[in-house]
Image (tube, coloured by chain):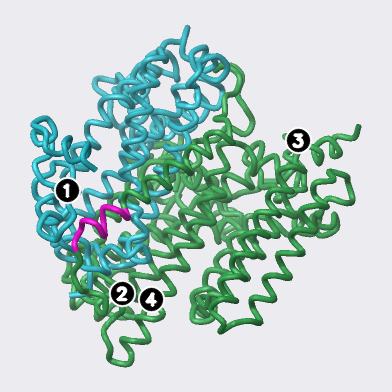
Amino acid sequence: MAIGETIRNSQIWKSIFRHPMPLDRRNRIVVMLTNFFLHLHPVSIKKQGIALSFTWCMGGVTFFLFLVETVTGVLLMFYYRPTLEWAYNDILALRDVTSLGILRELHRWGAHAMVITTWLHMYRVFLTGSYKPPREFNWVIGVILLLLTLLLSFTGYLLPWDQLAIWAITVGSNMARATPLLGYEGPGQQLLTIGGIDMITDGSDARFGLLGARFVGEETLNRFYVLHCIAIPLAVALLLAIHFWRVRKDGGISGPL
Amino acid sequence: MHSNELFLKDVSGFLGGYYAAIAVMNGIAALILWQRKNQPGWAIVWTAFASVMMVLGSLALSGVEGTVPALPQALRDLVNTLSGPVNYTVGTTVLLVAFFVYRTFFVQPMVAWTLFNVALLLMGLSMADQNFALIVMKADNVPIVGLVFLLAFFTWVATKQAVVNDERIARGEPPMEKVNDEKVLVWPDLVYTELICMIAVAAFLLAWAILLPAPLEEPASSVKTPNPSKAPWYFLGLQEMLVYFDPWYAGVVLPSLVIFGLMALPYLDFNKKGNGYYSIAERKFAYLTWQFGFLELWITLIILGTFLRGPNWNFFGPFEYWTPYKVEVLNNVSLTQVFWTRFLDQPIPVAAAGSSVLTQISTVLLREGPGLLLVGGYLVLLPPLMAVTIFRRYYAKMGFIRYMVMANLMLLMLSLPLKMVLRWTMNLSYIVSIPELSLNF
């Protein structure tokens, strides 16, 4: 195709793509080394390491779902206002009025799917013994990422501000009330007194720190919104980068020695 | 119209499509088997099964009571009567043990396919029950149905390869993963796989989002408590543990230990074999501990908490109506009561009002003596005892600190099933109960 040829030979194209079309062996190697998005990968890989029956592609699917959540999440942030006055109404509008209300479905089902695929990824890594040396530390990072995935889902659960949301968060966060020493119904909190004044009350315990209030209210909505949209995603992005980097540095996808 | 008739009208379209999908799936399976020419018998079986599914599908489309395929009422009632936390937990454990012991039988493709079809058929027949459908079709519960089928599928995928590898290793051959270790270029072999996976997942997610609206209930109200109030589904295993433990242990200590234990795992498993390939025989202890913790203590408790716990966290059979008026007699007693009142026939020791702190502490210690001794013995005496008996080889290989961490994590994990059994057999509430410190265990 002459037109394709012209485009690929243009200065603009060449300035974006640093390599020719990966049609022969040499360029298929070059493309992996010179493309930012592809340089996560090695140039060549053991055939068994990319067999679907071996990896189930679950780590990759989890990462893809994280990207889906990021994109749909950013778009939803344009619609949604995290205040008692607007939160529920905005979700209602997303369901009934807004033309791209399906973004909320994509975001919610993507989140559930991400929890499931994270578990399946962990399951696969265990069953193939891939946490064994030299990959111990990457497994530890994976466990933290699993915890953060659950926290992302948990903080997002509150945002629609319906009955399902606040009561699930109430039940979930009530546990923090029972934290040993630091929860005001927890064992041993009676011991933390200064001059007869209790240090741990329902206004200063672990649950209060989580909710920003004595019960799930506007402060909690704001707190969970910031955690959900900014704090936890940033932590996840950083740890993901380390997770991927370590996969490469620890010798790529695991396989028999 | 009777409410069940309305329900059947509503669900008939779904069920018709559902049976048709099973029929198509089995038709494709039969075609593949027929073309491979080595199992013509099975091809005929699945063709026949597909035709039966088509018949069931058309019956379901009628939406008329008595015509829509459903489990007989007597059978549903029987399942409800037999269901309970004890039978559920023991049943799932026995099932998982059977799958493990007879794994070479169950991993055969035709056996697995039969089981899969039986599960789908039972699911379809159950969906014609109003109470069952109400819980399973609740929007946020749908992912858990998916999780169950996905886990079953991937457990099969992994076990099948492990069985093959274990047989090869027993014959002195390397695992299959080793056979396949020629190198290929990432472009195109891997990047195209990734692209296809991304498109497939995106298509699946879009279809899911179009077919199933995200749940949105009434606006939040802090004065109207729903019954039951449930945490998000992935935490329902923890909520189920609240039946057996106080929140400080079930909701704070045990989850932290799960996270800590997972992180510690690579440093505790000293077995160098089974690195990078599916195997069971080479790492039986690690494998069984994991499967018990993940499949039994994590997944089945989530399923129990989601589908079988209704109002007031009472247990309901799969076809039972979730009535808030169900009353369950709870006469739980603490070990303190059992020991002092029943066993010694004495009043429980109480410190006199206004007595000194020292007297109060010693009274509590005396009162809770039996429980404290039991817990102390369990956590302090058992690890060294196991080190010189069943875990002697482990202790020698792991050294003191690693062994103690492993043994204590193990015992704390087993505290859950132990407490369950004590509750079911003795109605035991607490082994140690010190309300003075809000410390009940």
Disc 1 target residue: A21
Q: Are marks 2 and 3 on the same chain?
A: yes
Disc 2 target residue: B385
Residue drawn at point x = 66 percent, y = 36 percent: B311
Give the Cα distance between marks 3 and 1.
70 Å
Using the image, name the chain to which the residue with label 3 belongs. B
Give the Cα distance between marks 2 and 3.
49 Å
Q: Residue furthest bottom?
A: B171
Image position, residue B391 (x, y; %): 29, 77
B312, above or below B405, in the image: above
Q: Is residue B409 left or right of residue A161?
A: left
Give the Cα distance between marks 4 and 1.
41 Å
Q: Quadrant of residue A19?
A: top left
Q: Are marks 1 and 2 on the same chain?
A: no
> Given this view, does label 1 or label 2 mark the residue nearer the observer?
1
Q: Amino acid at mark 2?
A: Leu
Residues tagged 4 and 2 counted as in contact (Cβ below 8 A): no
SS assignment for the magenta stretch, majority: helix
> Given this view, does label 3 or label 1 mark the residue nearer the observer?
1
Which span is picked out in magenta? B185-193
Find out whether residue B8 is within the magenta segment: no
Disc 4 target residue: B162
Q: Amino acid at mark 3?
A: Tyr
Q: Which chain is green?
A: B
Image position, residue A227 (x, y; %): 30, 25
On the question of residue B351 being in view, the answer is: no
Looking at marks 2 and 3 on the same chain, the residue that comes earlier in the sequence is marked by 3
Q: Is residue B79 left or right of residue B198?
A: right
Q: Secondary structure at mark 2?
A: helix
Classed neighbour count for the residue bearing mark 3: other residues with Cα under 10 Å, few (<14), some (14–19), many (≥20): few
